[in-house]
Image: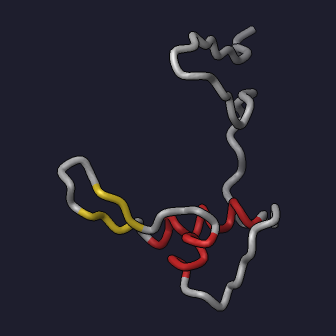
C-alpha cells in the first residue's frame, strides 16, 4: 500500500482524501465541482495497488520529472516507429 493507510470501511471520498486525492475542486468559473465516484475509485485502486486498476499505458516515460523554476527541460521518449 505504499505506506498509505487504507480503510475500505470508510466512504470512498474519505479514502481518497486520506490518500491525498481531492474529492472536489473549484472549476474555471469558480464553481465547486464534485469528482465522480468512478474517478475516485480508479484513483484509490491505483494508489492502493488494487489489481483491478487500469493497465499502465505503454509509454516509456519516467513517472515523474522534476525541474527547477525557470529551468529549460527536454523530455524524450522512444518512437514506436521502425
Which residue is nearer to you in this view: 63 or 54? 63
In percent of width and height, residue 26 lies at: 29, 57
Which residue is nearer to you in this view: 24 or 57? 24
In percent of width and height, residue 70 lies at: 51, 15
Residue 32 occupies quadrant: bottom left
Which residue is nearer to you in this view: 41 or 33? 33
The residue lying at 60 percent from left, 88 percent from top is 10
- Judge from the rendering whether residue 48 lies leftward or rightward of residue 16; answer left or right: right
Q: Is residue 81 above or below residue 34?
A: above
Quarter placement of the N terminus = bottom right
- Judge from the rendering whether residue 18 lies leftward or rightward of residue 35; answer left or right: right
Quarter placement of the C terminus = top right
The residue lying at 67 percent from left, 56 percent from top is 54
- Judge from the rendering whether residue 16 lies leftward or rightward of residue 30; answer left or right: right
Q: Is residue 77 above or below residue 33?
A: above
| Farthest residue, direction front | 69
The residue lying at 71 percent from left, 45 percent from top is 56
The residue lying at 30 percent from left, 64 percent from top is 33
Q: Is residue 6 above or below residue 29?
A: below
Figure disc tally: 0
Residue 64 occupies quadrant: top right
| Farthest residue, direction bottom | 9
Amino acid at each position: 500500500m505504499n505506506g498509505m493507510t487504507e480503510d475500505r470501511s470508510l466512504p470512498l471520498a474519505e479514502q481518497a482524501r486520506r490518500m491525498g486525492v481531492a474529492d472536489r475542486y473549484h472549476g474555471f468559473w469558480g464553481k465547486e465541482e464534485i469528482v465522480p465516484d468512478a474517478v475516485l475509485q480508479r484513483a484509490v485502486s491505483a494508489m492502493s495497488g488494487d489489481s483491478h486498476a487500469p493497465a499502465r499505458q505503454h509509454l516509456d516515460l519516467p513517472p515523474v520529472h522534476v525541474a527547477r523554476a525557470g529551468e529549460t527541460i527536454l523530455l524524450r521518449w522512444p518512437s514506436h516507429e521502425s
